[in-house]
Amino acid sequence: MSATPVHVIAKWKIQEGNKQTVLKLLKELHSETIKEKGNLFYMVHQSLADVNTLIIVEGYKNETEQKEHVNSAHFKKFAVEQIIPLLEGREVILATPLHD
């Protein structure tokens, strides 16, 4: 297992009229995700230019822990089954921090 942290930067564009539903579901997803042993952080941001655009920044101890997150029951329940269908666009970038 790699010791290199994995960060996730996700940009979600919410369909018009679904923001409150997505935010409620995201609160549940956040609550469960921060309990994961491999989670380092989980931050949700709202774009200043568009209130229906969210930027989610997550950190995991390594790639294995990040993969466990996306395979978790709570990710499937909240993100895959309920939130993603309410999005008009979604971009996810996996990255690792560069060290000097």
Image: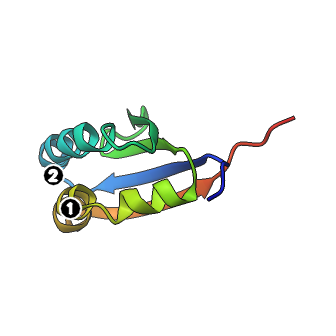
User: Which of 13 and 44 lies nearest the eye of the viewer?
Assistant: 44
How far from the left and from the top, in percent, is residue 41?
45, 34
Q: Nearer the viewer, residue 33 or 10?
A: 33
Give the distance between the C-alpha atoms of the residues marked 1 and 2, in whole angstroms. Answer: 6 Å
Image quarter of residue 31: top left
Please, what secondary structure does the residue beneath circle 1 have? helix
Residue 67 seen by the camera:
yes
The answer to whether residue 75 is left or right of residue 21 is right
CA neighbours of label 1 inside 10 A, class few (<14), some (14 to 19), many (20+): some
The picture places residue 86, in percent across and down from the top left corner, at 20, 61
Residue at the disc numbered 1: 86
Q: Estimate the x, y position of residue 98 in percent, counting from the top left.
A: 77, 42
On the image, numbered disc 2 is attached to which residue?
18
- Residue shown at 47% from the left, 54% from the top: 65
Q: Quadrant of the N terminus?
A: bottom right
- The residue positioned 42% from the left and 32% from the top of the image is 48
